[in-house]
Amino acid sequence: MHALTHCFDCLHLAARAGLVALACLLAGAQAWAHKASDAYIQMTGTDSGLTVRLDVALRDLDAVLDIDADGNGQLTWGEVRAAWPAIIRYAMANLQVDGCALGSPTEALERRSDGVYAALTFTSTCVLQAEPAMRYTAFADVDPTHRGIARTALPGQDARVRVLDPRQPVATGAPNASPAAQAPAGFLREGVHHIVTGYDHVLFLLCLLFPAVMSRTGRGWQPLPMWSQAVWPVVGIVTAFTVAHSITLALAALKLVSLPSWFIEPGIALTIVLAALNNIWPIFHGRVVLVTFAFGLLHGFGFAAVLGELSLPTAAFAWALLQFNIGLELGQVAIVCVAISLMFLARNSRSYAPLVVRGGSAAAMLIALLWLIEGTADLPS
């Protein structure tokens, strides 16, 4: 019996350590991690040559080129103009198309849903009969979350899309692939990647899960005695969040409904603040599932940027959307299973309520408030 008790104590300590480690990971995460980061590569072939356009977010380029010369956190037109030569050199060093020499690009700025991008357009005289190998290595040494979304359109062929990982930079075309295969096969993995690195979405889910293994009573938070008592509320929360963000992900990716980035990002931060506040001072009054659904609608817009920027044939787009959403759900289920298991093991600890439910919620609220301030600091007038 003593050995069994000791074993449970060890499990409690391990669970608490895991929760603390997870909290530290989230606290150290970059501010807007779920859209950090994607570049867009559009390769268009004609009977007389090739055009390649690369769109890269200025916020990403600033991380490697120090575009913000005065360090005030705001990029000015003068700073961007002075940085154009460095931007072009960086782009040419990190993007190559097999068998095609790309000349010096023309440059422009493009405002997208998640900020301003440097848009570089390269031309080449090479004529392609099949999709070539492409090497893309930008930010490989500074940002493991970065991806390149490459769309290739050649004469007489359907557009093809690939997700490029700069740490595995060569993507080879497959001109004889079936129509289903021509959809972006990497989008299932990209969906997992986006939810796992989407620290704001993960933090929102954790705030909903912190009290899931406890019961709020007149004597304060009390641990639930049975696993099943925690599972079904979690299923309801996760289902509501999944259905809601799937709806707006599809609508936003299809460009049927749109919201500006300056509204989406602070809005998501505000959902975290409210979810955390509810754990300290009840404001949802038992309507957690309904509130989760409402907030999940907003989170869906946060996931939509990747697919929303692509111009794909209907069948390929539908397949990409399905894969991306399945990837999101697989990643979400993995996160929830790990988190709720640790929380259930740690629930009997006297420090669970003050440390995890209240302390974790307070920490989440502070992080989200910082994100909210950052997201509203430069609202359009």
Image (spheres, rainbow, N blue to C red):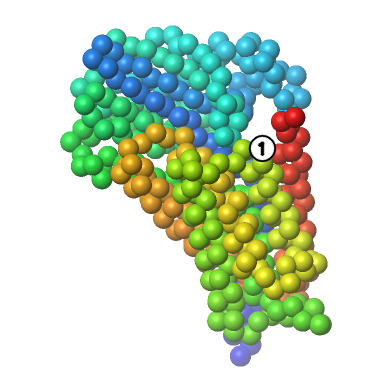
Task: Tell me the amino acid under the disc marked 1.
Answer: Trp
Residue 363, quarter of the rendered image: bottom right
Q: Determine which residue is flagged by label 1.
A: 262
Q: Residue at x 77, y 41 (%)?
A: 373
Position of residue 77 relative to residue 267, above or below, is: above
Q: Position of 133 compared to 6: left or right?
A: left
Helix, strand, or loop for circle 1? helix
Estimate the x, y position of residue 278 in percent, counting from the top left: 75, 65
Category of crowding for the residue at label 1, using alpha-carbon neighbours closer than 10 angstroms: few (below 14), some (14–19), many (at least 20) = some
Estimate the x, y position of residue 211 in percent, counting from the top left: 68, 71
Mark yes or no: residue 180 visible.
yes
Q: Position of 163 compared to 258: left or right?
A: left
Estimate the x, y position of residue 258 in percent, counting from the top left: 55, 41
Front-most of residues 141 and 118:
118
Position of residue 190 relative to residue 175, above or below, is: below
Determine the residue located farthest toward the front in the rendered image. 256
Position of residue 50 relative to residue 10, above or below, is: above
Front-most of residues 124 and 143:
124
Q: Residue at x 26, y 24 (%)?
A: 154
Mark yes or no: residue 197 visible.
no
Determine the residue located farthest toward the bottom in the rendered image. 1
Quarter of the figure that contains the N terminus: bottom right
Q: Residue at x 80, y 78 (%)?
A: 220
